[in-house]
């Protein structure tokens, strides 16, 4: 079967990550990019850089062959696809939806099966990396879909990420993403415990983590959440928040349960993130979990 044409692109969800990702797509793709968000400010900013600003999802659906989503959760993805004014109801020209959000593996596969009946292919392509990597177009993107679909969307994903990996069929991108995040959160949990123990033992926190970065405990988690945030005790609200981390680790634990794995260490980190959110740090950068460790 001949590949479906890709003449126009779309982007829905212009948040902290999505706006930067869309900006790269607009700047590098050479295609008309139609985009929208519930907030007008990012739409207007990107319109100044070439985005075809749209006032609704339906407007994007009528204009774009392939649409990329960057949304908070699976609930929003479901609504964009099947809600009022969504892709299915609109029946526009969109034939492929690339979900770059982080959502449930099971829900992703179920949504794909439903969309196929309406002539739309769903690809899961969640991302790893913070806002600077989104700005630089160097995200890691984990893709679930057939080899043919991956080949069709890869050139556009490459404008947003320097590492675009085909992980398997639909849902496999989400599987890799939630397990990646589970390990990162558990590592930051360990770092938060280590820095608290070190400080109480009389060590300088910066010296502790700098020395650790030269040994076998070095990691991206040590260098960014650790050195840049745990050391100065700085957990801003405009970074990856505790409540987002909590959503992701719950997705990983859901997958673990389905796989018959207890994942007790991950359960401990999940409980700590829950306590951190209850303590009022739900919007703060998730290494704020250290504040609960200090009180224990």
Image (spheres, rainbow, N blue to C red):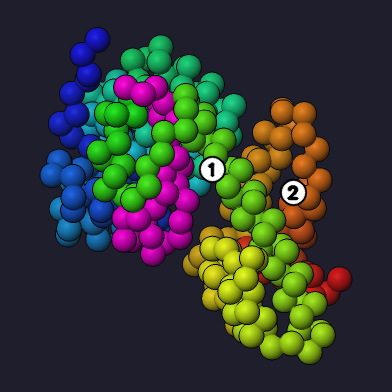
Q: Report crowding for label 1: few under 14, some 14 to 19, many 20 or more residues within 10 A (C-alpha).
A: many
The image shows residue 109, relative to residue 295, as above or below, that is above
Q: Which residues are magenta?
A: 122-148
Q: Earlier in the sequence, mark 2 or mark 1?
A: 1
Q: Residue at x 42, y 49 (%)?
A: 140
Task: Please name whichever residue, 184 or 32, is drawn nearer the observer in this view of the structure.
Answer: 184
Name which quarter of the figure residue 234 lies in. Answer: bottom right
Tell which residue pokes out farthest to the right in this image: 296
Disc ID at residue 288: none
Task: Please name whichever residue, 170 or 100, is drawn nearer the observer in this view of the structure.
Answer: 170
The image shows residue 44, relative to residue 6, as above or below, that is below
Q: Residue at x 77, y 34 (%)?
A: 261
Disc ID at residue 177: 1
Element under label 1? helix
Name which quarter of the figure residue 258 lies in. Answer: top right
Disc ID at residue 266: 2
Residue 156: give x, y in percent of width and height.
Answer: 26, 40
Q: Is 143 colored magenta in this rendering?
A: yes
Task: Please name whichever residue, 189 or 77, is drawn nearer the observer in this view of the structure.
Answer: 189
Q: Report crowding for label 2: few under 14, some 14 to 19, many 20 or more residues within 10 A (C-alpha).
A: many
Image quadrant containing the N terminus: top left
Name which quarter of the figure residue 138 lies in. Answer: bottom left
Q: Separation of disc 2 and disc 1 at Cα?
A: 15 Å
Q: Residue at x 64, y 40 (%)?
A: 251
């Amino acid at each position: 079967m001949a590949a479906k044409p890709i003449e126009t692109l779309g982007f829905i969800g212009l948040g902290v990550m999505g706006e930067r990702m869309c900006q790269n797509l607009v700047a590098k793709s050479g295609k008309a990019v139609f985009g929208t968000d519930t907030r007008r400010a990012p739409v207007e900013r990107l319109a100044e850089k070439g985005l075809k600003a749209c006032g609704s999802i339906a407007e994007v659906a009528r204009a774009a062959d392939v649409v990329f989503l960057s949304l908070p959760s699976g609930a929003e993805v479901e609504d964009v696809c099947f809600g009022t004014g969504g892709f299915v109801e609109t029946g526009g020209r969109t034939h492929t939806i690339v979900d770059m959000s982080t959502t449930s593996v099971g829900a992703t596969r179920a949504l794909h099966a439903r969309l196929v009946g309406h002539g739309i292919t769903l690809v899961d392509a969640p991302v790893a990396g913070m806002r600077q990597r989104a700005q630089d177009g160097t995200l890691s993107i984990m893709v679930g879909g057939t080899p043919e679909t991956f080949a069709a969307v890869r050139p556009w994903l490459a404008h947003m990420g320097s590492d675009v990996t085909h992980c398997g069929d639909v849902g496999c991108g989400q599987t890799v993403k939630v397990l990646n995040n589970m390990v990162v959160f558990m590592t930051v949990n360990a770092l938060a415990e280590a820095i608290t123990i070190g400080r109480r033992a009389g060590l300088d926190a910066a010296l502790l983590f700098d020395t650790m970065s030269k040994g076998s405990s070095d990691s991206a988690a040590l260098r960014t959440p650790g050195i840049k945030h745990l050391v100065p005790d700085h957990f801003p609200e405009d970074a990856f928040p505790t409540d987002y981390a909590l959503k992701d680790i719950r997705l990983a634990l859901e997958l673990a349960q389905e796989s018959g794995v207890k994942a007790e260490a991950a359960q401990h980190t999940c409980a700590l993130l829950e306590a951190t959110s209850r303590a009022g740090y739900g919007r703060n950068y998730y290494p704020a979990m250290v504040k609960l460790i200090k009180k224990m």
